[in-house]
Image: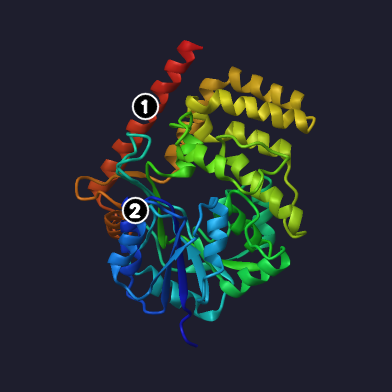
Amino acid sequence: MPRPSLTIVLPTRERHDTLRWALETCVSQDYDRLEIIVSDNASRDQTREVVEAVGDPRVRYLNTGRPMSMTENWEFALAHATHDYVGYLGDDDGLMPGAAGDLSEILAGGEAALRWPVHAYYWPSYVDPSLANCLSMRFRQPYGTVPRRSAEVLPEVAAFRAHAHQLPSLYWGVVKRSLLDSVRQRSGGAFFHSVIPDIYSGIVVAGSVDTYLSTDRIYSLSGSSGHSTGASQVTGAGNDAEDSPAQRFEAENSIPFHPALRMTAALPVLVGEPLLQAHDRFASVPEVDISALLDAVLRDRDYLLNPRVRDSVHATLRQIAVQHGLGEHLEHELARERRGATARMGLAAADLILRGNPIVPCGEGVTNIYEATLLADRLRTRSAASAAVATFRGRAEKLRRAGSAHRSRTAVD
């Protein structure tokens, strides 16, 4: 059976500085049956020049012709994909070395989708200086895949007992294009129906197949730069500025946030919104327990360790809770949180150490996502003592900063 062809989509808008290196990770792939689509969302910078300078026949440049929302750009690009399997990269993300060839071998049997873990590179421009130019990754990543049953994983995600990264998203995986076309036909001619297209795709794909493949080996590296919308939303850094990624994202949304929720800097809400949108369209997607969502926010370690967003998150949670008749429940949980703030902070910090990916400072030899993928590829094949020491020091410094910020905020309050 011939090895399948792959389409890698890079939606972008006025980020030619990071796009250049994201593209480098793609054109470095030693695989001919690869299509690389750059979907330029009406950029006014040097995006087109950066793409044309690559000079690789596998690269296709598209321009939307007018500014679009993120979801509209993802939809526009998907309509132009022509190969057997499709995956998406952010314009500050990167494909791992050899990823395209490995994926073609894994998917030679025609499986519906494959997902892999989310590991990250924090660009030097990242909003948190303590994480700038660091990798977040596991060292040992064996080859091999296992089947996952959607009927087991999807309800756990909908109940907020499992992370959405367990789902077969286009953003941390690849999906058969024929399946994407089928979903598009069943949902009114468009595939994406959420302002969170990456998580939405994982939910809808899982709701459309009995099984998909899962691996512990990464094939892309998620980049977080000063441009990153997700980092701006969840950390709250710079969100008050009119030109922040989060503010721009919300201003340009073409799909209303689901009326059962409101946008806020909390990951469970950003998972709940696409779950609700998908449930409205597909009977195979479970209902969302709003009470469980509220509780999940109050357990979320990013929220617990980030006093910058706490007041705004509380205000939004109160609005959601009142809307669903859960105001008394939320106030009870908030009171518990205040009484046990120190213990919850400690548990969140412990969870970060025990279950979070180790943080590895990259050093002067790494300044972009391309160089980060090369370093990550070396680290995942060996467990160097020096890397372990750097990991411990980097994580300890992050926790020290988080604890200091919490104490300062407590003193002010």
Report helix, strand or loop for mark 1: helix
Name which quarter of the figure residue 206 lies in. Answer: bottom right
Q: Is residue 66 above or below residue 397?
A: below
Q: Foreground residue, 46 or 328?
A: 46
Q: Foreground residue, 277 or 154?
A: 277
Classify 10 Å Cα crowding around label 2: few (below 14), some (14-19), many (20 and above). many
Q: Is residue 311 left or right of residue 59?
A: right
Q: In this view, does 152 lie above or below 105?
A: above
Q: Residue 360 carries which label?
A: none
Any part of residue 387 in sight: yes
Q: Is residue 167 left or right of residue 357?
A: right
Cβ atoms at labels 2 and 1 below 8 Å apart: no
Q: Is residue 310 above or below residue 34?
A: above
Identity of the amino acid at label 2? His
The residue shown at (53%, 32%) is: 303
Report helix, strand or loop for mark 2: helix
The spot of residue 224 in percent (x, y) is 40, 46
Any part of residue 214 in sight: no
Extreme residue toward the left, this view: 364
Identity of the amino acid at label 1? Arg
Name which quarter of the figure residue 179 lies in. Answer: bottom right
Mark in the foreground, 2 or 1: 2
Residue ID for mark 2: 16
Q: Is residue 337 above or below residue 363?
A: above
Q: Foreground residue, 148 or 329?
A: 329
Residue ID for mark 1: 401
Give the number of callouts. Answer: 2
The residue shown at (51%, 37%) is: 247
Classify 10 Å Cα crowding around label 1: few (below 14), some (14-19), many (20 and above). some
